[in-house]
Amino acid sequence: MDVDQSLIEQGVTIVGVIQDEQFKSKQKNSVLLVEEVKTIEFIIDGKKDNNQYQNTSLKQSLIDLNYNVIHCVSNSALLSKQCLQHLPDILIINTNEPSAEILKEISNINKLTPLPVLVFATQETPSLIKSSIQAGVSAYIVNDIQPSRLNSLITVACERFKEHQLLVQELQRTKNQLADRKIVERAKGYIMQQRKMTEQEAFTLLRKMAMNNGQTLAEVSNNIITVFTH
């Protein structure tokens, strides 16, 4: 693979180098674009091109890459509501510096309708990047970029988002399993006490009840707990 200089040299916080032609969007992924004060500046052949700077917008570059920009807003107010309304595949925010309001909106989005979030900014501090990642930002890109790398940046952010979601889902499954186990143990305790059964006998009874009722062990256990506690 022909690798350019590391994306870090372009001010990219999340690094990943992917050939653009390989990952060009075959389907039109929908993008909700937020462009606040700053205008993105592209680097052409290692330097800013005035004509390109005047004529190229982030929105147009996304359209050229076959992304469907479904909505473009000028501020982040009620951004979570915009995401619920338009249900985009990707959220891109172009700003000088993500404000506390932006990060709050991103955090709300991450809870309601999680999706890959890219932030293009001119300001970079460790605390700001940390706050952005904690809010749910998948990629924080600083300063100027090459238009040819835009698709790679989006692809890397999407892949990072997918990996994070898998971790979140696995963590939630583990929490659910632990909670279910506690419920089953509690129900076994009630059965053992009321029917003078051993632990194995109580568990066998729970399993039989679950099979007969087409329920999970946790559901049956929860019903038993409700009976004994009300």
Image (cartoon, rainbow, N blue to C red):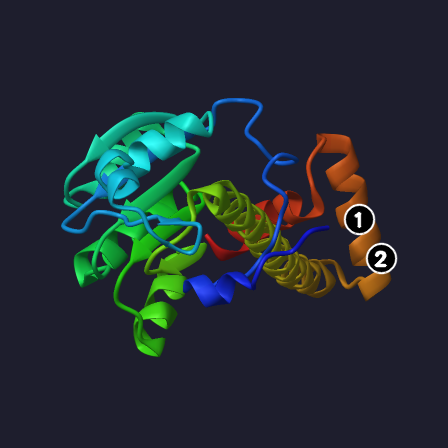
Question: Residue, x 49% and y 56% (percent of image)?
Answer: 229
Q: Label 2, secondary structure: give it.
A: helix
Q: Name the residue under label 1.
A: 205
Q: Distance between the residues labelled 1 and 2?
A: 6 Å
Residue 172 in the image: x percent, y percent?
Answer: 57, 55
Q: Quadrant of residue 130?
A: bottom left
Q: As rendered, which of 197 and 4 lies closer to the eye?
A: 4
* Left or right: 36, with 140 as reference point: left
Check disc 1 and give the amino acid type.
Leu
Q: 37 or 189: nearer the eye?
A: 37
Q: Do the residues labelled 1 and 2 touch (CB within 8 Å)?
A: yes
Q: In which quarter of the image is residue 208?
A: top right
The answer, for residue 12, to whether it is visible in the render is: no
Residue 220 sits in quarter: top right
Which of these two is toward me, 153 or 90?
A: 153
Picture coordinates of residue 87, whole percent (x, y): 36, 29
Residue type at mark 2?
Glu
Residues packed near mark 1 inside 10 Å, few (<14), some (14 to 19) or many (20 plus): some
Is 204 on the left or on the right of 125, as rendered?
A: right
Position in image of residue 38 (x %, y %): 18, 51
Compared with residue 188, is residue 76 higher up or lower down, i.e. above or below? above
Residue visible at 45% across and 44% down? 150
| Residue for point 26% across, 62% down | 122
How many tags in the picture? Answer: 2
Q: Can residue 167 be seen in this view?
A: yes
- Which residue position is annotated with label 2? 201
